[in-house]
Image (cartoon, rainbow, N blue to C red):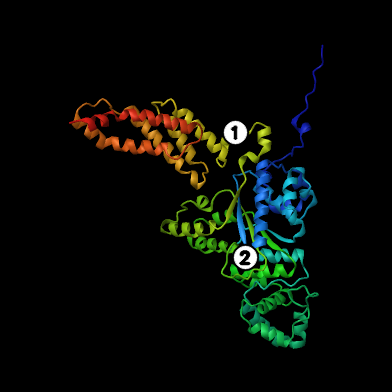
Amino acid sequence: MTPPTSKPTLGELFDLPEHVGANDFVLKLTEAIARPETTVKDYVVTDQLRHCFDDALALVKDAIETRRSTGAYLHGSFGTGKSHFMAMLYLLLSNDTRARSMPDLAEVVAKHEWTAGKKFLLVPYHMIGAETVEERVLGGYLDRMRELHPDAAPPGLYDADSMVGNALKLRQQFGDEAFFRALNESPADDGWGDGARWDAESFEVAARADARSRERSELIGALAHSLMPGARHTVATVDLATGLALISQHAKSLGYDAVILFLDELILWLASRGADAKWLTREGPKLANLVESGNANRPVPIISFVARQRAIRELIGKAGLGSDQALVDEALEWWEKRFSTITLEDKNLAILHDLGAAQFAYLSRWSARGNQQRIDEFAAELAPLPKNTATLERSVAELRERNWPTGERPILGRLEMAVRLLRWLHGADTTLTDFEDSALWYAREGSWVDWARTRIRGGYERGPLAAALATFGSILSGTAAPLARLTKAP
């Protein structure tokens, strides 16, 4: 008798965790950057992703050459690796040898060898929890400065008038000698302001200068660095346009060629306040300043990459905004159109293809591939023209619950119209012979059928659904017999 063989378990074949939570499937940008070796090891580069990296690096190159700020959405459904892509882009731009030596990225790295000679100031962000754009974008830059250049004086991103007013009080309280000794507690010259530049004359010139001048900004930065380190928590920041200009000037003084912002949760942050029309119309349009600004004093460009699963207007929906909806839509559309788009496609999930799981994309309502699979199912159900339309009606209802890009939503109306026409087809009386009855039929139903038939056939020409709608439309043409008789009647 042959003894039973012991088959290995999945746990013996694969390195599986004992416990898995929902967050285990989400790669956080900051964590990925902090663990570059693991980030690179786990990354799978597809042909489409190579094109995405090429597009992203070309965007950066163009911004540097034209000295023009720009931004791009990294658009993809849930699980397409937007954060992982941003982390890899971050590593490529920071000249990480592990990322740049990946064989599958060799062609892209060679094409963009110019990046090796550039110095990029890379700033990752998480927007969740912020009250204003300035709080996180400007505050995040200051955090990054403390991490990368702890000895450099920061840019003057705070409300200048209140800080200068407090400085005048401190000068009177401490006396000039103690006041300027403390104010000059800045390390060696970093290009943004000398460590020993402040005296009564330079202080008074800066204190009287325009709020957006370099002198005033240097003074505010020196105050925040020395006498008022808690200013971030007690003093309001400047507006975003002014702050971004100051950031650009500051980065230039430190030798950087560009400032690159990685905004991983920006869209979700806006969506989390979707029912607050006043807040949305205030904060949303500010983001256009990332790519354009009335303050043109940006010696190095600011380049923004924004992870996006859905357009912000789709995420927010109507949100109970009532009469404010049009105002919110206009405000959001105004800034969204100022970003280009780099799309990470579902097919990049190579492991799903290897496991044969791509065929189950329909299980996720966020998957574009899943949308197409559901549409193909609808087409198969429609093709035999069933008399009972209940299944088709359920399919349309389920399709409406899925995520659809704005440009693709009209297909839902065509599907719904096809179901209505099918119900009409099985109940229509096409045996009319009397002229008067035929005229009444056309007035009541015929013109609607002509319009609906044209609608379902127009604008969708992909896959099984296109064939099903075309066949259905041809069959419906035969129901217009009463109209033909009407036009020939004496």
Label 2 SS? helix
* Up/down of 406 relative to 202, above or below: above
Q: Which mark is residue 360?
A: 1
| Position of the C terminus by quadrant | top left
Which residue does the numbered mark 2 point to in the structure image? 135
* Up/down of 305 relative to 424, above or below: below
Q: Give the amino acid at mark 1.
A: Phe
Q: Residue at x 59, y 68 (%)?
A: 241
- Near mark 1 (Cα within 10 A), the count class, few <14, some 14-19 or many ≥20, is few
In terms of depth relative to the viewer, which is nearer, 195 or 431?
A: 431
* Residue 23 in view here: no
In terms of depth relative to the viewer, which is nearer, 17 or 274?
A: 274
Q: Which of marks 1 and 2 is nearer the N terminus?
A: 2
* Image position of 181 (left or right of 302): right
- Near mark 2 (Cα within 10 A), the count class, few <14, some 14-19 or many ≥20, is some
Coordinates of residue 334 in the picture (x, y in percent): 50, 59
Coordinates of residue 271 in the picture (x, y in percent): 54, 54
* Image position of 43 (left or right of 467): right
Q: Distance between the residues labelled 1 and 2?
A: 42 Å
Coordinates of residue 235 in the picture (x, y in percent): 63, 73
Q: Give the amino acid at mark 2.
A: Glu
* Up/down of 231 relative to 410, above or below: below
Q: Are marks 1 and 2 in contact (CB under 8 Å)?
A: no
